[in-house]
Amino acid sequence: MKVLYASVTNTSQVLSVNVTNGHSVSMATATIECLSTTLDIGDPITVNLGYTDDHGEIFTGYVKVIEENQNPTTITITATDVLIRASDYFIVTTNPATPLQVQNKSPEAIIGQLLGLAGITDYEYESSSYIWGVTGPCKIDCISSYDYSKMLTDLIAWQLWADETGTVMFKDRRPYPMGGDSSIGTITTPELITLKNWKNDKSLRNKVVVWGQTGIYAEAHASSPYLPVDFYKTAIVSSYVIDTQSMAQDACDFNLEVFNRLARGYTISMEGKHDYLSRKLCHLNYTGEDLYIFSAEHTWSKSGYIVNLELRKE
Amino acid sequence: MNWQLGATRIFVQDISDGVKAIIAKLQPLAGGTVYQTFGYETSGIKLGGLIVGSGDMIHLKSLTTSGNASFELDSPEGDLGDFFVESVTAKREKTISQTLRPDLDCDAPVYAVDIDLLEDV
């Protein structure tokens, strides 16, 4: 018998917890229903979930909404992970003639600078080997710190996210298992409650067009065994940040590699485990495969602790 | 001393109580049921008995509309604690002449009641 455990910052008598995050979701969200809290809007919050003898932190963020419900009298707290600070930080120059400018900087350095504007200093990144603002400065104005950072991230098909401890990550994280990934654990068959095997072409794109500054454009395409000959599903990437032909071509090639594939995977429901979070790799005993956790939803209540996962193998 | 709930006299004929653990049951694809304990429900008491007279009946029913107030339950053995009245189910008995309450008219109505109480902790 496992005894359920939940600890939420400055909150007691927790009735239910729901934490969701995913590869295609900009930020993780936590919803806590409780009877008592001293939290206020903007307060930092962490959620630690599991069982009395096995629990861990699954969310770090800031309180965005507090609702006091009547009949029955409960409090519902909604929080978003630390990237909400970057989303809420809107970069606007007082003098439109002198916007924030960056030149000859790597995307990881620019993103670090923009996160710093929003007060986010807990930041880890991989070196992208790219330099933006080569032919002239990139002007950053009237856009949120998050939106600009996300745009730079999407150009090279990387990922920007905040992990469960509140550290912002900028990495080459594909939505499927990659070389060098290590599994965080094995999902055994007795832990599985439901399992669905699926594949679809929803995100398949076998042609990518990139538009940059005036005169800069590129295209990459490839055949797909799931589409008719010479039939292309096209994605477009457009940004004035792209100021050289080679950058435009690289953006095409990287995005084509990510998108020209079927999505294959499993949707499972399993007994709750706190360390099964999105963007990690796990081993599914049922199929004998290592799978990427594309999305994760942790639900904790008197109905039990259950984790719903979308697992991708490609 | 008679049984009383919030000063309403009850002729108790049976009493039962119980506690309950809140246990979630998850059924995996293979293997036995997985149990997860959420906590426990505070003990409750079920009383069955008789109420004599419309006045006591009305008063007993009003205990369910008292907001967040709880009421003392007294028994011949003493004070059993404070309880919230969760439900009162009453059925009028076929009687010609009651003798349980000599202070009331002999044709006072008699009700068989079932009362669910939740302990105030």
Image: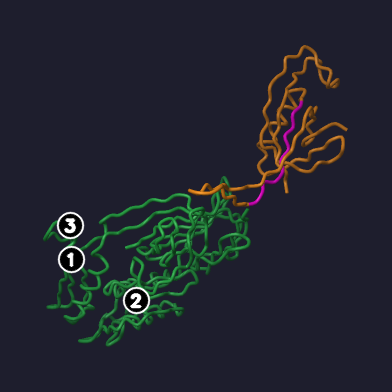
Amino acid on which the number 3 mark rests in the picture: Leu
Q: Nearer the viewer, mark 1 or mark 2?
A: 1
Q: Are marks 3 and 1 in contact (CB under 8 Å)?
A: no
Magenta part mainly helix, strand or loop?
Answer: strand
Please, which chain is the residue tagged with disc 2 on? A
Vertical relation: A286 (above or below) B19: below
Query: Which structural element holds mark 1?
Result: strand
Q: Secondary structure at mark 2?
A: strand
* Residue B71 shown left or right of residue A1 in the figure: right
Number of callouts in the render? 3
Name above or below for residue A118 compared with residue A207: below
At label 2, counting other C-alpha atoms closer than 10 Å, the crowd grade (few under 14, some 14-19, many 20 or more) is many
Are discs 2 and 3 both within one chain?
yes
Q: Is residue B43 magenta?
A: yes
Chain containing the residue with disc 3: A
Residue A146, compared with residue A313, is above or below; it is: below
Mark number displayed over residue A207: 1
Spatial CA span between label 3 and label 1:
12 Å
Q: Nearer the viewer, residue A301 or B12?
A: A301
Q: Position of residue A222 (x, y in %)?
A: 17, 66
**Residue denoted by label 3:** A227
Q: Are marks 2 and 3 in contact (CB under 8 Å)?
A: no
Q: Amino acid at mark 2?
A: Ile
